[in-house]
Image (cartoon, rainbow, N blue to C red):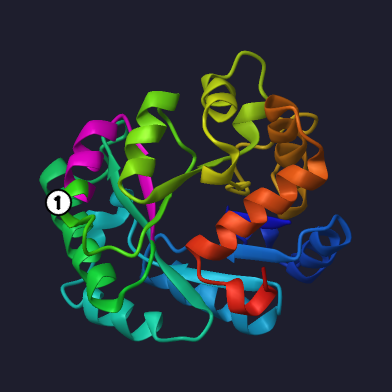
Amino acid sequence: MIDSHCHLYFDTYDGRREEIVREAEQAGVHTIVNIGIDLESSRKCIDLAERFAACYATVGVHPHDAARAPRDYIASLRSMASHKKVIAIGEIGLDFYRNLSPRPVQEKVFREQLELACELSMPIVIHTRESFEPTLEIVRTYADRLAGGVFHCFPGTADDAMRVIELGFVISVGGVITFPKASMAKTAAETPLDKIIIETDAPFLTPVPYRGRTNYPGYVVHTCRKLAELHGVSIDEAEKVTDRTCRKVYRLVETFGE
């Protein structure tokens, strides 16, 4: 099983990372993708990928951090992206819910990173909150040059998901689908299983039965179980399908086989 999106570099996990990775592996999670949100965290993702065989990394600047990106941040990302265990550019996108960076700055930094992804032929990891339509419109202008990617913690409807899929992307769902009456669960149920990957977004969005506590990569098992239930398949089948899709998105097919 693959946790396609987490943040093990957060201080929350200090002193326990080896134990956490081991517990995830014992739970059946063979691959953990740590997602960068700025230059410092992107470097930490690479450090984790070098330290643990199960870990891979992405590098990018989150919309919250767009206003703090240094002038040469693209050059730094380009250099980091050459690492053999860096598998995507992200997490990038727009967040009009918190607006921690001005919207024009968010859009500028998003476009610059999309250009980098096109240049490097790397998939992207997209964050969008209260900004789905403008995010989709920007992505559409680059779609024919992009190497695909994922809209993480997907916020939209099944119809929205199909618009994303038509552009060559997949969606990811996390612990939110285990929450009672969650709209993400309805979207996950109505979206083709082979266009979905699973994530924890640890330490956030912890699934039932641990909701309200710190999230861990091993808890992606609970999301997989719920997704299987929503699609009326076994957890083994849900794991097989989502793992295959994730390997293709992140180009890990050669590592893990078909």
Residue 187 at x, y percent in the picture: 51, 25
Residue 129 covered by magenta stretch: yes
In percent of the image, x 38 and y 80: which residue is there?
Answer: 81
Residue 105 at x, y percent in the picture: 14, 51
Query: Which quadrant would residue 147 be assigned to in this image?
Result: bottom left
Q: How many marks?
A: 1
Q: Which residues are magenta?
A: 124-139
With respect to residue 151, does 92 lie above or below? below
* Closer to the camera in the image, 86 or 238: 238
State the quadrant of the C terminus.
bottom right
In percent of the image, x 17 and y 58: which residue is there?
Answer: 111
Residue 75 shown left or right of residue 77 in the figure: left
Residue 258 covered by magenta stretch: no
Residue 214 at x, y percent in the picture: 70, 43
In percent of the image, x 63 and y 58: which residue is there?
Answer: 244
Quickly name the residue at label 1.
141
* Closer to the camera in the image, 65 or 57: 57
Query: Which quadrant would residue 38 be assigned to in this image?
Result: bottom left
In percent of the image, x 59 and y 26: which residue is there?
Answer: 189
The amino acid pointed to by label 1 is: Thr
Q: Residues within 10 Å of mark 1 (few under 14, many from 20)?
A: few
* Closer to the camera in the image, 252 or 57: 252
Residue 104 shown left or right of residue 219 in the figure: left
State the quadrant of the N terminus.
bottom right
Q: Is residue 151 visible?
A: no
Residue 247 at x, y percent in the picture: 58, 64
Query: Residue at the top extreme?
Result: 181
Query: Residue at the right extreme?
Result: 26
With respect to residue 219, does 118 lie above or below? below
Circle 1 SS class? helix
Q: Is residue 109 visible?
A: yes
